[in-house]
Image (spheres, rainbow, N blue to C red):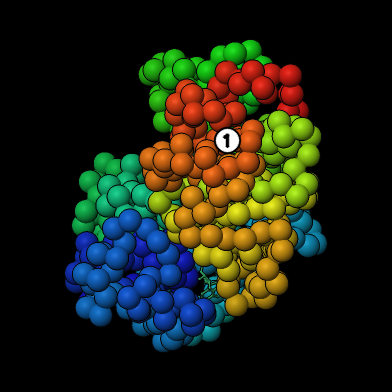
Amino acid sequence: MVKICCIGAGYVGGPTMAVIAVKCPEIEVAVVDISVSRIQAWNSEVLPIYEPGLDEVVKQCRGKNLFFSTDVERHVAEADIVFVSVNTPTKTRGLGAGKAADLTYWESAARMIADVSKSDKIVVEKSTVPVKTAEAIERILTHNSKGIKYQILSNPEFLAEGTAILDLFNPDRVLIGGRETSDGQKAVEALKSVYAHWVPEDKILCTNLWSAELSKLAANAFLAQRISSVNAMSALCEATGADVAQVAHAVGTDSRIGPKFLTASVGFGGSCFQKDILNLVYICECNGLVEVAGYWKQVIKVNDYQKSRFVNRVVSSMFNTVAGKKVAILGFAFKKDTGDTRETAAIDVCKGLIGDKAHLRIYDPQVSEEQIQRDLAMDKFEWDHPAHLQPAAAGADKQVSVVGDAYEAAKGAHAVCVLTEWGEFKGLDYRRIYEGMQKPAFVFDGRNVVDVEKLREIGFIVYSIGKPLDPWLKDMPAVA
Ligand SMILES: NC(=O)C1=CN([C@@H]2O[C@H](COP(=O)(O)OP(=O)(O)OC[C@H]3O[C@@H](n4cnc5c(N)ncnc54)[C@H](O)[C@@H]3O)[C@@H](O)[C@H]2O)C=CC1
Ligand SMILES: O=C(O)[C@H]1O[C@H](OP(=O)(O)OP(=O)(O)OC[C@H]2O[C@@H](n3ccc(=O)[nH]c3=O)[C@H](O)[C@@H]2O)[C@H](O)[C@@H](O)[C@@H]1O
């Protein structure tokens, strides 16, 4: 029986390995982690991450050919193929701070593999890493090899949260990069045969190692660049009376451009876009490509601009001060259908409003109060470390309360901000919300989910990203 071990039981390791286990019943899959609480949760009724369809997949194979364990060394030693899906945060100190990837966890995983291995292994980079990481890993493993042979493959993951199971069942492509030697190609074939259980051959792309590593960073940079492009247009739409949804539709019907990923928003979030682009910028700078680095850096700058533009809109619309005012925040996750808050635009928006002394009442259907308070207390990039290495939860911010539904959040509020596109926010009884609010009552929609005309009829002053401005807002430009 082929044995697979995955180091790192996170948003990628957990779902990816569960899908391999369910599609390949003859392969034994162990997912291991240094976080005891995470492994306990994977073995419990309440999984550590919320992802549609994940529970069913895990229940089908857990205890049969899928195991979650903290016995990292044993499972690594027994495996034929070791996936490494650990955190690759942005460095906060030293050389490359604020841009370069911190490979501490990757390196310690590689050293542990070298320490415990007693048989030849294929080591698969599943984490997103800087191009040429495979070479560094190869050196660590071969210098400590005790005669054991390792082949390093790059197999970046393209799943998106909220649709992870669908993406894994039916990927646009699976990418495998390996050494162009006969042993390297044998390893590529071995991994290909795992995916071939359910992925059509023509969707399994095989490249050299560096192309695979760089393609992952490039794909995320291209995706984020589309969002920053449409968000940059949203500012111009507000200034000119154009409607960003109409512009995006007209642009996206050009088959060369395509309709996806053109939804204007309060800014992209998530654990990877910013981190991976910063990493790309750093690699460009290290290679002396200053103009190329500047080009990609701009994607992040526009995203930061979009978030602060939103905060400025809220404050300037409400007589240039939100001090002591109650603001309801609907949605805290970085997108719908996930409880993940990593780099969510909501953090920067809430911090901006708190900075202007607002009192926030936050509701998100999937994010706990503890998580929200932690996020608002944490410094940039601190979140991307294993849970037990993160700073202890600070005391609750007195300007912030977290409540159990949208109506409670909006009760007595001066304004409502929609920051995540949860379906339930479309169907709320906005008349009821209006009646319970202070007047004038404002809605600031960072996701274009509300029916603007209907809300204006009710009496709200409505701001919607990239839409023709409410007369109230016209004389109050929100420039960062
Ligand atoms: N979250 C996403 O949607 C995607 C993430 N990625 C990449 O995948 C990698 C992992 O991301 P996530 O799963 O989101 O991170 P995560 O933080 O959810 O999971 C990483 C896990 O690795 C564990 N870990 C760290 N060092 C370890 C070690 N030495 N031994 C055992 N366990 C260790 C941590 O405790 C943690 O549970 C990152 O490089 C990320 O950029 C790639 C595609 C999608
Ligand atoms: O490397 C990763 O981590 C993953 O990053 C993204 O996936 P994810 O961050 O989970 O979610 P997305 O659907 O890409 O959304 C990212 C952010 O962009 C925002 N977004 C997305 C699309 C859009 O049109 N407009 C927009 O503002 C979302 O609301 C969200 O805040 C990529 O889509 C995945 O392919 C990749 O594997």
Picture coordinates of residue 55 (x, y %)?
29, 65
Q: Can residue 125 be seen in this view?
A: no
Badge 1 crowding class, 10 Å Cα cut-off, few under 14, some 14 to 19, many 20 or more, is many
Q: Is mark 1 on a helix, strand or loop?
A: strand
Above or below for 129 versus 122: above
Q: How many marks?
A: 1
Q: Which of 147 and 230 is in front in this view?
A: 230
Q: Is residue 166 visible?
A: yes
| 271 displayed left or right of 202 | right
Name the image quarter holding the N terminus. Answer: bottom left
Residue 467 quadrant: top right
Residue 229 quadrant: top right
Picture coordinates of residue 5 (x, y %)?
38, 74
Picture coordinates of residue 33 (x, y %)?
47, 77
Above or below for 475 versus 297: above
Picture coordinates of residue 366 (x, y %)?
45, 59
Q: Which of 209 and 173 is in front in this view?
A: 173
| 149 displayed left or right of 3 | right
Q: Residue at x 41, y 77 (%)?
A: 41
Name the image quarter holding the C terminus. Answer: top right
Q: Which residue is the extreme one toward the front?
A: 435
Q: Which of 264 and 330 is in front in this view?
A: 330
| 7 displayed left or right of 285 | left
Q: What's the residue type where badge 1 is placed?
A: Val
Q: Which residue is drawn at 60% across and 77% down?
A: 388
What residue is pinned by disc 1? 443
Q: Which of 18 and 473 is in front in this view?
A: 473
Above or below for 470 versus 304: above
| 141 displayed left or right of 148 | right
Cβ of mark 1 under 8 A from ligand 2: no
Q: Residue at x 54, y 44 (%)?
A: 436
Q: Which residue is drawn at 61% across and 20% down?
A: 469
